[in-house]
Image (cartoon, rainbow, N blue to C red):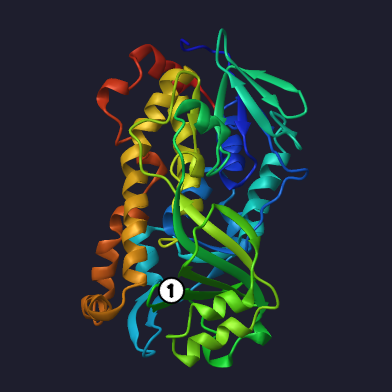
Amino acid sequence: MTPSKNPPTVLLVGGGIGGMAAALALARLGVSIDLLEQSATIGEIGAGLQLGPNAFAALDALGVGEAVRRGSVFTDRLVMMDAVDCGEVASVPVGEAFRARFRNPYAVSHRADLHGAIHEAVKQHPLIRFHTSAQVEAIDMGGQGVTAVTSDGRQFKADAIVGCDGVKSVVRSKLIGDAPRVSGHVVYRAVVPAADMPADLRWNAPVVWAGPNCHLVHYPLRHGEQYNLVVTFHSREQEEWGVTDGSKEEVLSYFEGVHARPRQLLDRPTSWRRWSTADRDPVERWSEGPATLLGDAAHPMMQYLAQGACMALEDAVTLGEAVKACGFDMTAAFKLYEAARIARTARVVLSVREMGRLYHAKGVERLVRNSLWIGRSPERFYDAVEWLYAWRPEHCLDDAPEALRPSAEAAAMAAALSLH
């Protein structure tokens, strides 16, 4: 595909946070979008999530930063506690000095609130069309453009396709064909009213209680009216990726070595949702011709750095910048986007795995972890996360090699593009 003054048409498979963000990033350039969502309604399941400064940088670039801020809780610090002896391992302030360093706050939000803020902006854009109950079963990339066929026989045609369809991505199966790596780590999530939280644990902070082969997390949601509870453990069973209802008895059986203070949190939810988690080993490419991947479809990761949604938002902004830079040459844009993202997202995936090991350290490893972090100054913590949180949209293509930069003709055309 060569650069054209006529914006292309694009199929986006998946209506989660990444798909919605990608739809907004591309439609703002004038790209016509058909968004295919397998569920009967557009929405987001789950509970809370954490938004680092890099997420807000991306949200601002998409024009929805202020809307997300209105529904978020801005935390005072990030805390790690030892779940065995209740000692504080680390407390990192994320107030004025943190914001000055990274140019944005650290916040927590309900997934539905974040998704809803992006969805509201997307619904108002005339170039985006929604198709629900559209489960894609086959993709044809032969001839001109691409065709997606849904389970009910509908066919959608466009110039290009972006798979935003999660860990079990149909688009990824077409492009790569690898299998997810089921981690064996199980995550239970619940939301409880603030009144049901122990008074001495109603902290305005994401708090990690790190235990042997397990951990607990809690933080406030929706202006402090609710608390998000997340517990993770190494399963004794052979797990398969998926989401089901949880069992309180199962949760309790994995936290016998945990101090009573954090363990009391396990009694608070009236119901749990159970996630058997998976990621994938990083790959050297995830694009082919007029097709690419985004978010969990490209680089699924576990939750230990709270970066899954953040990476999808960065992906969406970078994809839009690549399309703009390449003057709507989608094959070139997908290569440029991929080259700008692969090393960074792979670093996050691998760092997440290592962070999971640190959270779940036991025995001597637990003592080593604590000795490394106790007493560390805020500035040293900030230095350690500089690579992650200092991401900026204006530099999002910097990691791509010069050979993938657009020609002078395409660059001139890109400069002439205006946002819609």
In the rendered view, would you say 399 is above or below 106? above
The 10 Å Cα crowd at callout 1, few under 14, some 14 to 19, many 20 or more, is many
Tell me which residue sits at (59%, 49%) in the image: 64
The quarter of the displayed image where residue 364 is located: bottom left
- The percent coordinates of residue 160 (x first, y second) are 56, 21
Residue assigned mark 1: 214
Asked whether residue 204 appears in the rendered view, the answer is no
Tell me which residue sits at (49%, 58%) in the image: 238
Q: Is residue 322 left or right of residue 400?
A: right
Tell me which residue sits at (31%, 73%) in the image: 361
- The percent coordinates of residue 187 (x first, y second) are 53, 65
* Element at label 1: strand
The quarter of the displayed image where residue 80 is located: bottom left
Q: Amino acid at mark 1?
A: Cys
In the rendered view, would you say 60 is above or below 382? above
In the rendered view, would you say 60 is above or below 257? above
- The residue lying toward the viewer, choosing from 55 and 284, is 284
